[in-house]
């Protein structure tokens, strides 16, 4: 690591010696080694990591050039910005395991949408961002322009139209850091997110005339294929792209498939496989489970190689990811 004597790094290096703890340490050292050898790192973000405030460490990873592209769910794309403008209105429910259906109904009636132990306020978060991004959707629609979901988010962040509403230190927003760096982002299945639902509603109501004003997942795959082809150095040269996966689902499955697609469908056989792989997940290996599949299964799909460094950490990503990032940042 950059500073192995730093408190967090020193603690992990001394105490994390076995089982998932040892894998965490090994994965962090492998991540740093991959960067030192000239590689880039592609990060995938599933679950509710933005609501878990991963931006506290991820934003600095982006600013320091430790992450070179991200694939995330639509929920993670928007929830970092919800937190940016409405943090003071959020409510934590530490006793969420004890809530009754009637308790949940009362949260609904207060427009408090629960994500495990955290409630997101609809009016202060979701509707505020909807209002801001609707202006951009309509503007693009009227101009006959089309953008990806993350590009609309970048527009509203870089315009600073929300700046007066910030309720956290903007340095802790990973989306703001990504916008400022113009980080490549890929958001498959965006229509599944709250803003995706809202966009569908505005298309149905006629506020947006052309549903294709927001670009699609197939176009995201095409963009990812071009990005990977241009960024990954040919086989035999240092500078491959690593894959750091937080959670499972579409955020991980969508982008990792770009390599076999390039090889098998476009015959770009000179493009290397992913050069590092780490997944943080508590999903169990079961019949047909992608999120719980061991990394070696990906060899059969042409995603990873026999010699690719592979790590799987079976634990809570809200604990593991900040610790790995802390080691890489030399904290």
Image (cartoon, rainbow, N blue to C red):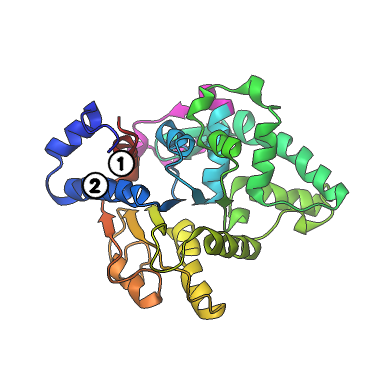
Q: Which residue is mark 2?
A: 24
Q: Is residue 234 left or right of residue 322?
A: right
In the image, 271 versus 285, the foreground residue is: 271
**Rendering coords of residue 15 (x, y %):** 13, 37
Residue at 54% across / 34% down in the picture? Answer: 177
Q: Which residue is mark 1?
A: 324
Number of marks in picture: 2
Q: Main secondary structure of the magenta part?
A: helix
Which stretch appears magenta? 85-105
Give the quadrant of the C terminus: top left
Residue at 50% across / 67% down in the picture? Answer: 258
**Rendering coords of residue 105 (x, y %):** 51, 38
Label 1 with label 2: CB-CB less than 8 Å = yes
Residue 93 sits inside the magenta stretch: yes
In the image, 330 versus 57, the foreground residue is: 330
In the image, 268 versus 60, the foreground residue is: 268
* Dot 1 or dot 2, earlier in sequence: 2
In the image, 93 versus 312, the foreground residue is: 312
Name the image quarter holding residue 283: bottom left
Mark 1 lies on a secondary structure that is helix
Mark 1 surroundings: few (<14), some (14-19) or many (≥20) residues within 10 A: many
Q: Is residue 315 left or right of residue 153?
A: left
Q: CA distance from mark 1 to mark 2?
A: 7 Å
**Rendering coords of residue 57 (x, y %):** 40, 34
Depicted 52 relative to depicted 249: above or below: above
**Rendering coords of residue 127 (x, y %):** 67, 35
- Which residue is most to the front? 237
Residue 312 sits inside the magenta stretch: no
Depicted 119 relative to depicted 271: above or below: above
């Amino acid at each position: 690591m950059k500073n192995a004597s730093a408190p967090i790094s020193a603690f992990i290096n001394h105490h994390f010696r076995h089982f998932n703890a040892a894998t965490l340490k090994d994965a962090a050292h492998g991540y740093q080694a991959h960067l030192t050898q000239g590689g880039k790192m592609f990060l995938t973000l599933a679950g509710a990591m933005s609501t878990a405030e991963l931006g506290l460490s991820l934003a600095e990873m982006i600013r320091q050039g430790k992450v070179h592209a991200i694939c995330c769910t639509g929920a993670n794309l928007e929830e970092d910005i919800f937190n940016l403008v409405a943090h003071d209105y959020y409510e934590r429910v530490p006793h969420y395991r004890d809530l009754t259906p009637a308790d949940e109904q009362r949260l609904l009636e207060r427009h408090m949408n629960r994500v495990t132990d955290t409630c997101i306020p609809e009016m202060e978060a979701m509707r505020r961002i909807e209002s801001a991004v609707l202006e951009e959707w309509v503007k693009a629609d009227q101009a006959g322009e089309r953008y990806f979901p993350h590009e609309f988010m970048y527009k509203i962040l870089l315009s600073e139209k929300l700046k007066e509403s910030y309720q956290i230190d903007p340095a802790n927003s990973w989306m703001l850091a990504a916008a400022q760096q113009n980080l490549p982002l890929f958001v498959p299945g965006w229509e599944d997110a709250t803003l995706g639902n809202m966009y569908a509603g505005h298309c149905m109501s006629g506020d947006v005339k052309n549903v294709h004003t927001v670009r699609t997942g197939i176009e995201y795959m095409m963009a990812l294929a071009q990005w990977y082809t241009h960024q990954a150095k040919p086989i035999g040269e240092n500078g491959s792209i690593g894959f750091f996966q937080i959670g499972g689902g579409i955020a991980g499955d969508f982008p990792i498939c770009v390599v076999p697609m390039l090889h098998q469908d476009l015959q770009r056989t000179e493009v290397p496989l992913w050069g590092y792989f780490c997944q943080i997940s508590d999903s169990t290996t079961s019949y047909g489970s992608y999120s719980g599949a061991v990394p070696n299964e990906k060899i059969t799909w042409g995603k990873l190689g026999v010699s690719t460094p592979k790590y799987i950490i079976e634990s809570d990503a809200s604990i593991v990811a900040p610790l790995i990032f802390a080691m890489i940042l030399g904290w």
